[in-house]
Image (tube, helix red, strand yellow):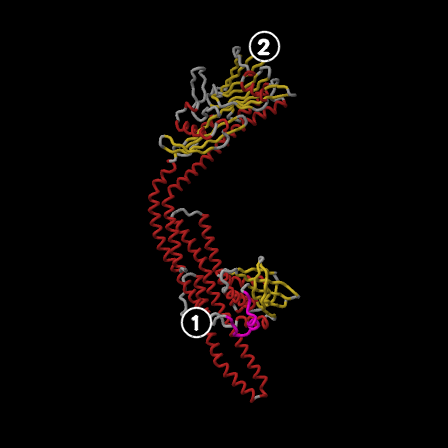
Amino acid sequence: MKFSIKNILIFSFSIIMFITIFFIILSSYYSSKNIMSEHTRQIMENISSFAVDKSEYYMGIASKATKLTKELESSSVINNNNPKIMMKYFHEQMKINEQFSAIYYANSNGEFYMLNKNKNGYMEKSITLNENKRVVKKLFFNNTTNKKTIVFDENDNYDPTIRPWFIQAVKTKRLNWTDPYAFFTSKKPGITTSVPIYENNKLKGVVGIDIEIDDLSIFINNLKISENGKVFMMDKSLNMMSFPIKNINSINKKPRLLKLKEINNEIVKKAYSELLKSTKIETFSKKTFLTFTHENEDYSAMFFPFIKNDITWIIGMYAPENDYLSLIKKNQLIGIVLTLIIGLISIVFIYKIAGIISKPIRRLENMAHELKELNLDIDAIELSPITEINEAIESFNTMKDSLKTNQVMLENLNATLEEKVENKTFELKELNDKLEEKIQQRIEELKEKDLILIQQTKMAAMGEMLENIAHQWRQPLSSISTASTGVKLLKELDVLKDEDLNKNMDSINESAQYLSQTIEDFRGFFDPRNSKLKQFNISHAINKTLKLVNSQFVSKDIKIIKNIEDISIITIENELIQVFVNILNNSRDALQKLENKEKFVFIDTYKKDNKLIIEIKDNAKGIKEEIINKIFDPYFTTKHQSQGTGVGLYMSENIIRTHLKGSISVRNETFIYNQKSYKGAKFTINIDL
């Protein structure tokens, strides 16, 4: 069953349009929801990464400062023998790192040196042992009044060697971090890091740094992922670092961080409980994205671990889905109505475009068929608004006029030829003295006839190839129409992406280039300027031939097997291509008679004895032995009268022998291919290099 290109275009575009509209109506909400959900997830991932980077920044500063302090011990900067130098170094570190709340050093004897920052200024504290006498000295400095006050506190019983930061550093012999806690003086959240100092494997002391993380807490608390979303941070003990500090405790009156169960945010608690359903907090080590419902509202949440040395913090966030989907729900109905309207308009537009494209192509196809049958009394085709098709129409019209003129000349010449021969014979008998002149005249007339036969054969081949070209254009023209309509639709739907536009424009350009190249191949074959001696590679001529005839072979399931040795030759390329076309067309016609069988044409080229050898064979069971020696005779044909004139192989032999100074022969041959035996005719062409 065959369909017109117009019906195919209209049907295809309409089906695509209705499927697209149906898909948009059916899936617009769900696809938008998925997109926004993925967008939410990406935002959460970015925020979690940002929060981790910020946390690593805080931890990195303290680590570097602690390690630097440990390294400076070897140069006597950190040493209880030089308290002034050590305090100077502590002041420098406090100025450089605003997050530091206190920096201190204690040796194994209990001596202690500390610089502590407060809201009015700072305090220097030292605990020294003088002949077993313990001296506690405190120096207070007020930044407002620039006043220094020194106090000796005999009641201070602070022992650094029993503090957790000292004990843990000595126990692990490495850098340590505490869990977050609320500093007593500033009532701000913070952490402490400490590192032991050894000399000759003997403990000399421990350096500690208190770091305020209130800026980090405020930063985390202020991060916004949506109108009603929130970001929070807690440690593995569920101390909330991004919520206000609990100022009063009934036992020791010390400030502390709120626990998860104490905060006034049920959504955070719900999100955490959902996390515990999929993982254990003790083994939590990778980011987890989850969804949950709270009070009939859907939420998206993400938890991300921050693990650094001894620290394990959990960064969490949540966002109500309605923050992202409310606008989509409002605009969904409008989008559906607009989609339907655009779809109806597009169908009308498709109908018009299909008519513009298909009408001239259908006329070209009809003319190609008529030219193939040498029916030259047909009207010229009207020009098309499409440039490429218009050029083809002009070529078809010109070709038709040329064929008609040559046909009239040939008919007139054939009608008078017999009479002229008789008259010339009579004259030769009477004018024996002019024999040589009359013979020469006759030879010239025969040459003219041969030239006309060549032109007729070429024109007939032209008609056949034009039908092939019209067939080849259907697919790229359909691709152009599909791509252009798709771009318009995406643009009207306001969903056109650059990658989609580039992809469709590339598709249109590739199809247009293909159509243009087809026209150039056609022109080149029939351009008389190419009928001159020139140097070229034989593979180039064979590939140009296959471009002209390939679609007829593909449509008839005929496979062409090439084994080409690329050899340079100087001869008339177009004449050689015409010979290839004639031989391949004969093979194609013979192979069509094989039903439900594999069909092959083999093309081989090689060099032998300074000659180019070209072999073309098929598996069409060969030529009958009683006629194989006659196939190069003029007007001899085994085809039906409507299919052949009997001059194709005759003119091919004439071209090879007289124009290309070579030879051509044919014989039947049995051969093996893919472990199967086949029989067919093999044409062999010999041309001197």
Q: Position of residue 519 (x, y in %)?
A: 48, 63
Q: Which mark is residue 133?
A: 2
Nearer to me, 620 or 613: 620
What's under tag 1, amino acid-wise? Leu
Q: Looking at the picture, does residue 13 appear above or below residue 314?
A: below
Q: Looking at the picture, does residue 419 appear above or below residue 515?
A: below
Task: Reply yes or no: does residue 632 show up in magenta.
Answer: yes
Is residue 144 shown to the viewer in this render?
Answer: no
Element type at mark 2:
strand
What's under tag 2, amino acid-wise? Lys
Nearer to me, 342 or 252: 342
Element type at mark 1:
loop
Q: Looking at the picture, does residue 630 appear above or below residue 220?
A: below
What predominant SS class does the magenta segment belong to?
loop
Task: Reply yes or no: does residue 218 show up in magenta.
Answer: no
Nearer to me, 522 or 593: 593
Label 2: how many Cα within 10 Å (few below 14, some 14–19, many 20+) = few
**Magenta residue span:** 621-638
Q: Quadrant of residue 430?
A: bottom right
| Screen quadrant of the N terminus | bottom left
| Screen quadrant of the C terminus | bottom right
In the rendered structure, the answer to whether residue 71 lies left or right of residue 186 reads: right
Report which residue position mark 1 lands on: 376
Q: Which residue lies furthest to the right in this view?
A: 609
Q: Where is residue 175 in the image (x, y as percent from the top left)?
A: 57, 24
Q: Position of residue 395 (x, y in %)?
A: 46, 67
Q: Which residue lies furthest to the bottom in this view?
A: 430
